[in-house]
Image (cartoon, rainbow, N blue to C red):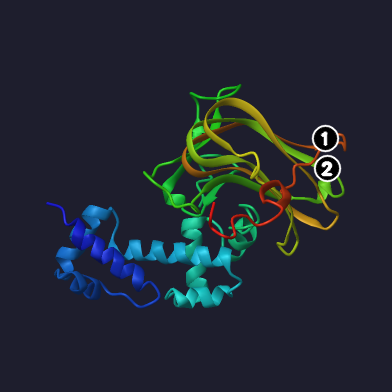
Amino acid sequence: MTHSKEIQAALNYIEMNLCEELSLDEIANAVGYSKFYFHRTFQSEIGISVYDYIRKRRLAKAASLLLSTNVPIIDIALTFCFESQEAFTRAFKSVYQMPPGRYRAAIKNLICGGFPMDNSAKIKEWLFTGTAPEKFEADIDNKIYNTGTKSATLKSIADSLEADEYATIMQQFSARNFLGKRARFSGFVKTLEVDGRCGLWMRIDNALGVTLKLDNMQNRAITGTTEWNHYSCVLDVPETSGVISIGVLLNGTGQVWLDNANFQEVDCSVPTTDFTPDDVFPDFPKNLTFEE
């Protein structure tokens, strides 16, 4: 016997009260169940306990605020009912594998200068992160690869995704060896039924976390099913740079593989691939009379 109607009502109630103290008694009462029966039913149908679900939803909302606002971390922590910034940081790291401050600096400008974590044990030296990490999976594939014996793969494991939900396999490293130089991040990419967009990305930040340069293949995204092809991101590294971030992202459903990635200095004969508004946006607004 399923109770999808009652559980959906409970999920809606939780969603409307994420910024309020929530008790099991209160939620169960809202859907007309006893506390113990509701707890068992919720865990059976959702797969996790009520408290774990509330915690994950609060952290997801907090992650969204970290990326879309400049609200202080302590205020975000208190907004979502964490007793202190330290408690919030511990909980946040357990899901996103980064403290909130680093998450905000590392991910905020990933998509088109705009918007999330980790299973680094599966892919050594690489972080797995995104706006909805529970809806994606990252792993090493020893059956599909470009050359050698393995590749990295990233795939969606949810039936559907919101427009802003994505995941990435990424690394960060110091920019000091590339200051004043032109650098290229490249690799072989293969895709399967990507409904959305994916591609390599490269971002350069200064020591304060301000993005100086960005290319996420926004204007040449990979979609659908493709065989192995070589792609690259090329950026000039300003003298004020502090951190370089590189990775492959999947924004939407499907699967992407990355193999034989490379990062190197290149000369000025190699053109840069910086994201610029002119590449994506028209010169003037269109259909202002709504008659088209």
Task: Tell me what residue is drawn at x 67 percent, y 33 percent.
Answer: 231
Task: Tell me what residue is drawn at x 14 percent, y 64 percent.
Answer: 37
In this picture, residue 18 sits left or right of residue 180: left
Residue 91's spot in the image, x, y percent?
46, 64
Q: Amino acid at mark 1?
A: Val
Residue 122's spot in the image, x, y percent?
50, 40
Circle 2 residues within 10 Å: few <14, some 14–19, many ≥20: many
For residue 179, above or below residue 33: above
SS for tag 1?
A: loop
In this picture, residue 214 sits left or right of residue 13: right
User: Dot 1 corresponds to which residue?
Assistant: 270
- Disc marking residue 153: none
Q: Are marks 2 and 1 in contact (CB under 8 Å)?
A: yes
Task: Tell me what residue is drawn at x 60 percent, y 22 percent.
Answer: 148
User: Dot 2 corresponds to which residue?
Assistant: 182
Q: Is residue 56 visible?
A: yes
SS for tag 2?
A: strand
Report which quarter residue 24 is drawn in: bottom left
In this picture, residue 181 sits left or right of residue 17: right
Q: Is residue 261 visible?
A: no
Circle 1 residues within 10 Å: few <14, some 14–19, many ≥20: few
Residue 290's spot in the image, x, y percent?
54, 58
